[in-house]
Amino acid sequence: MQLFCYAWRRYRIWWRFCLGLLWGGAIALCLNIIPVGQVPLSLADGLPALATHPLPGTLEQWQPASKDTRDYFTEIKASPLGYLIWSEFPVTVFYPELEPYLSPNQVQQQTKWQNAVQQAIAAWSVYLPIQKTSDQENADIVILRESPPLQITVNAETGERDYSFGRNAETRYRFYLDEQQHVRHRMTIYLSPHQRAIATLNTARHEFGHALGIWGHSNNSKDALFVHQTAENYGISEADINTLKKIYQQSTKLGWPLP
Ligand SMILES: [Zn+2]
C-alpha cells in the first residue's frame, strides 16, 4: 500500500539534523532552519518563549459528540519552533487558476483539480477561517498543481539513499520573520494533477490538514489524515477535528514576536 504522503519520513530526518545542531552547541548554525523571508532570523537575538494562542472561535465552539470521541494527538509532532499553529485569521491560501490556451482535455483536468482543492478548503473552513488569495508571494498556504519534486535523501537509519518516485502529494513548511518581528511559517502543498477526481480530493483534504497543523498521521482509515491512501471518501472525521482542537491548545513560538 502506498503511503499517503512522504512529509513525515523526511520530517523525522530533518528534525534529527536540527537536534544534532542544537546539541552540538552550534546554535548559530541553526539559522538554516529559518532560511526564508526577507528578514533573516538571528538566533543570537533569541526566539520567543513557547506560549499558547487563544483558541480560534470556530474550534472553541466545536465540541466532540461524546467524551469518548477519539483523537490521534499522540501521533502529532511539534516543529523545532513548537506546534504548527496559525494564529492570524483568516489563513490565506493561494492556488493557481486555469492556465490559458488549454486543450479541452487539459481544461477538464485542471478544472477537476481545482474543484478538488476548493472542496477540500471548504471542508476545513468549517473549523478554521480560511480565505483564498491571489497573492502567491504572501499566502500562508500555497497549493501547487504539480507533483512533489524528486528528492534523493539519505535515510538516517539505514544510511542508504531514499529515492522517492511516483508521489502524489507533499506538504512542506518553512519559517520567516515578518515586518513586525513575529516568527511565522508558510506551508507549500504539492498536489499532483495526475490523479483521479476522488483521489485528488482525498489527497487535497489530507495535505490541507497537514498545512493547518496536523503534523502526523492517523491509523484509522476513516480519518482524513489516515496514513495510507484509500479509495473511500470519508471526509473530515470527528477524530480529525478533536485532534486539531488539541493541537491549537498547545504552545508554540510561531506567531509571537522576538523578545
Ligand atoms: Zn500525510
Image: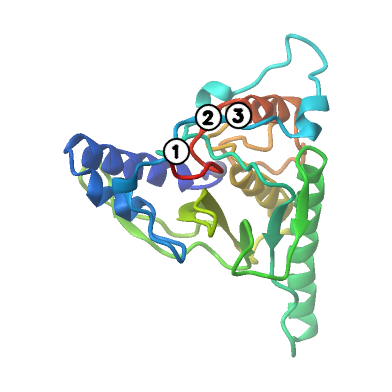
Rendered position, 27 above or below 198: above
Residue indicated by mark 2? 51
Q: Nearer the viewer, mark 1 or mark 3?
A: 1
Q: Which mark is residue 247?
A: 3
Query: Residue 258: horizontal and vertical position, in percent?
Result: 45, 45
- Residue at figure coordinates x 66%, y 41% from the top left: 230
Residue type at the position of mark 1: Pro
Residue type at the position of mark 2: Ala
Query: Residue 168: horizontal and vertical position, in percent?
Result: 56, 57
> Do tag 1 and tag 2 residues touch (Cβ < 8 Å)?
yes
Rendered position, 85 above or below 178: above
Q: How far separated are the C-alphas under marks 1 and 2?
A: 8 Å
Residue 153 visible in the picture = yes
Query: Residue 37: horizontal and vertical position, in percent?
Result: 46, 62
Q: Which mark is residue 211?
A: none
- Residue at figure coordinates x 68%, y 17% from the top left: 70
Q: Of marks 1 and 3, which one's residue comes earlier in the chain? A: 1
Rendered position, 22 above or below 180: above
- Which residue is at the front of the view, 7 or 51? 51
The quarter of the image that holds ligand 1 is: top right
Q: Quadrant of residue 73?
A: top right
Q: Of marks 2 and 3, which one's residue comes earlier in the chain? A: 2
Secondary structure at numbered mark 2 = strand
Residue indicated by mark 1? 48
Query: Residue 145: horizontal and vertical position, in percent?
Result: 63, 68
Number of other residues with Cα within 10 Å of mark 2, as a class: few under 14, some 14 to 19, many 20 or more: some
Q: Nearer the viewer, mark 2 or mark 3?
A: 2
Secondary structure at numbered mark 1 = loop
Secondary structure at numbered mark 3 = helix
Q: How far separated are the C-alphas under marks 2 and 3?
A: 13 Å
